[in-house]
Image (spheres, rainbow, N blue to C red):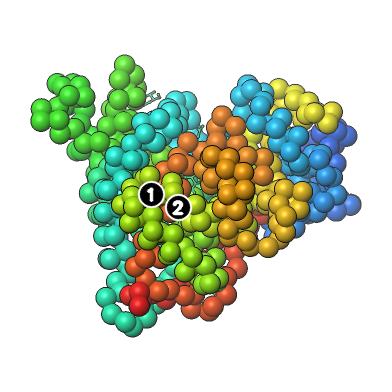
Amino acid sequence: MAVVPATLNSTTLVGAAILAVLLLVVLRSFISHSDLDKAIPSVGVPRGPFAFYRGAWSFLKNGRAVTREGYLKYPGRAFKVPLANRWLVVLNGRTLIDDLRKAPADALCFHEGTNSILFLEHTLGHEQHHDPYQATVVRTPLTRNIAVCFPVIRDEVIAAFDDLVPATTDEWTTVPAMQTVLPIISRVTNRFFIGLKCRDPDYIKLTTQFALDVTSDAMWLHLVPSFVRPLAVHLFGHLETATRSAMKHVGPMIQHRLEMDDKYGRDWPNADRPNDLISWLIDEARGHPSRRNVRNLTRTLLNVNFGAIHTTTQGFLHALYNLAAHLQYVEPLREEIERVVKAEGWTKTAMGKMVKLDSFMKESARFVPGGAVMGLRKVLKDFTFSDGTTAPAGVLVAVGVLAEHHDEANYVNGGTFDPFRFARMRDDCGEGTKHQMSTPSHDFLVFGIGRTACPGRFFAVNEQKLMMAHIITTYDFKLKDGVFPEDEWIAVLGSANSTAEMMFRKRK
Ligand code: HEM
Ligand SMILES: *[C@@H]1O[C@H](CO)[C@@H](O)[C@H](O)[C@H]1NC(C)=O
Ligand SMILES: *[C@@H]1O[C@H](CO)[C@@H](O)[C@H](O)[C@H]1NC(C)=O
C-alpha cells in the first residue's frame, strides 16, 4: 500500500488510516480461516454478507449474553466469538481450563495475549514489553513485605477516608462511589509503593488517569495499521506525557535512591533505606543497566500502577455495592472484625483470620467478576486441547469466567449471592487456604490461573479487606438508591457502576 507522504498533515494521516482500515476489512472478508472455522464452532455470528463484522458489532453490545449462549450450547468444549478484528476462542469447563493452566508459555502465552489487546510496546513502553520484570518484584519482595508494611498501609486507609469521606457528625453525607474509592485506592496502594508522596493530588490524578489512557490508546491503535502505529502514537499517544509527568513526581526520589545504592547498596547509614516498591525494583535492577535508570524505573512504576489500581477499585466497589445492597450482613461482619482485632490488632494476621469477610469479598468477586472472560492467552503454536479441539497458532483463547462462576456444577445455587458460602466450606473441611479469596482455581478465576495468576493478589486481598473492615467499623452506610447499581458492559468487560452514589455517617 501507500508510500508515506513526505509531508504529513493530519488530514492525509486520517485519510491514510481510513483507507488502511477499509482495505483490512475487505481483505479480512476474503481470507478464509478454514482451520479455525472447521475446528471450532462460532457463536453470535449471523448468516449472510459481512457476517463476521455484523457479529462483531453486536458482540460489543451483547458480549456477555453471547458468551453465556456459547457456554450453555457447548458444555466442556470450546467455541469462538467475534471480537472487532479477530476471533476469540472461549474455553468451557474444568478440563479445558486445566489444559490452559498447564500449557507451557511457548504454546499458550499470557504476555503475547495481553500484547495483542494492549500493544504494550506503544501503550506501556518498549522496555515494559521486552523486559517485564515487575511481576517478579510484585510476586516476591512486595508480597513478603505486606506484613511489615501493614501499619503504614492502614495509616493511609485512615487518612484517605478521613479526607474523602468525612463523617464527623450524625448527618448522612452523600458521595459518588467510584470517584471516591478510586483516589483512596490510589493513595493506599502508592503509600506502599512510594511512601507519603502518594498524597500529592497531581500524582493521584496521574495514576488513576494512566490506566484509562493506556486502554483508550490501545483501542484506537486497533484501527491503525501496524506500520503507522509508531507515528500515530508519537502524535496522539499518552505514554510520553505520562512518563514525563511521573518523572516530575518520582524522578528526584528515584535518582537519590540510585545514588545511595551506588554508595551503600542496601545498607544505608542508620538503616534508613525506605522499604517500598522503588527499593524492591532497584534490588531487582542490580546488574541490569537498562533497568537501572530513572526513566525505565518510572515506567515500571507506572506499569505496576496500571495493573493495581483500577482492578482493585473494581473489585472493591462490587463488594461495597453488594454489602450496601444487603445490609443484613454488616452485623455478623462487624462482630467478626471486632473480635479478631481485639485479639490480633490491625495486622496482616488479623486479616487472615477474618474468614467471613474473606468469604464476603470472594463471593462478591465470584458473583460479579468484572468481565465475561479471563485468562487471555495467545496461541503461539497449534495447541490441541483434551477434547481434541485444535486452536491454530495466532488465535486468542480465554476462559468464560462469568458463566463458570455461575455454573451449578461449580456452585450450589450459583445464581444466588450467598456471602458466607466460602466461610462454610472452610468450616466443613478445614482445608487451609483452599477456599480463600487469594487462591485461584478452575471455579474462581478473577486473578487468572496458573503460573501467571496475578502476583499482586495477596496485596490486593489484604488491601480490600482492610478497607472494608475500616468502613464497617467506622461508618454506617447505604446506597442512595437502595439497590445494587447495574454494571456497565462493553463487549466482555463489565465495570462497576460509575455513577452510583453512597451515603455515609459516623457509626451509631
Ligand atoms: C483485585 C485486584 C486485582 C485483580 C482482579 C487482578 C487480576 C489480574 C489478572 C486476571 C491477571 C492476569 C493473570 C492471568 O491471566 O493468568 C493479573 C496479572 C498481574 N497483576 Fe493483578 N490483579 C489485581 C491487583 C493487582 C495488584 C494490586 C498488583 C500489584 C501490586 C497486580 C499486579 C499484577 C501483575 C504485575 C500482573 C502480570 C503478571 C505477569 O506478568 O505474569 N495486580 N492480575
Ligand atoms: C530502558 O530499557 C530499554 C529496554 O530494556 C533499553 O533499550 C533502554 O536503553 C533503557 N533506557 C535506558 C536509559 O537505559
Ligand atoms: C448506575 O447506577 C445508577 C443508580 O443505581 C443507575 O441510575 C444507573 O442507571 C446505573 N448505570 C447503568 C449504566 O446501569
Relative to 306, is 444 on the left or the right? Answer: right
Residue that numbered label 2 is attached to: 354
**Mark 2: secondary structure:** loop
Q: Is mark 2 within 8 Å of ligand 1?
A: no
- Residue type at mark 2? Met
In this rendering, the answer to whether 479 lies above or below 207 is below
Relative to 424, is 42 on the left or the right? Answer: right
Answer with the quarter of the image where residue 389 lies.
Answer: top right
Q: Residue at x 48, y 68 (%)?
A: 330
* Between 196 and 86, the one nearer to me in the picture: 196
Neighbor class of circle 1 (other Cα within 10 Å; few <14, some 14-19, many 20+) is some
* Between 179 and 24, the one nearer to me in the picture: 179
Q: Residue at x 78, y 26 (%)?
A: 384
Place of residue 37 in the rendered image (x, y in percent of width and height, measured from the top left): 85, 36
Q: Which mark is residue 350?
A: 1
Relative to 339, is 400 on the left or the right? Answer: right
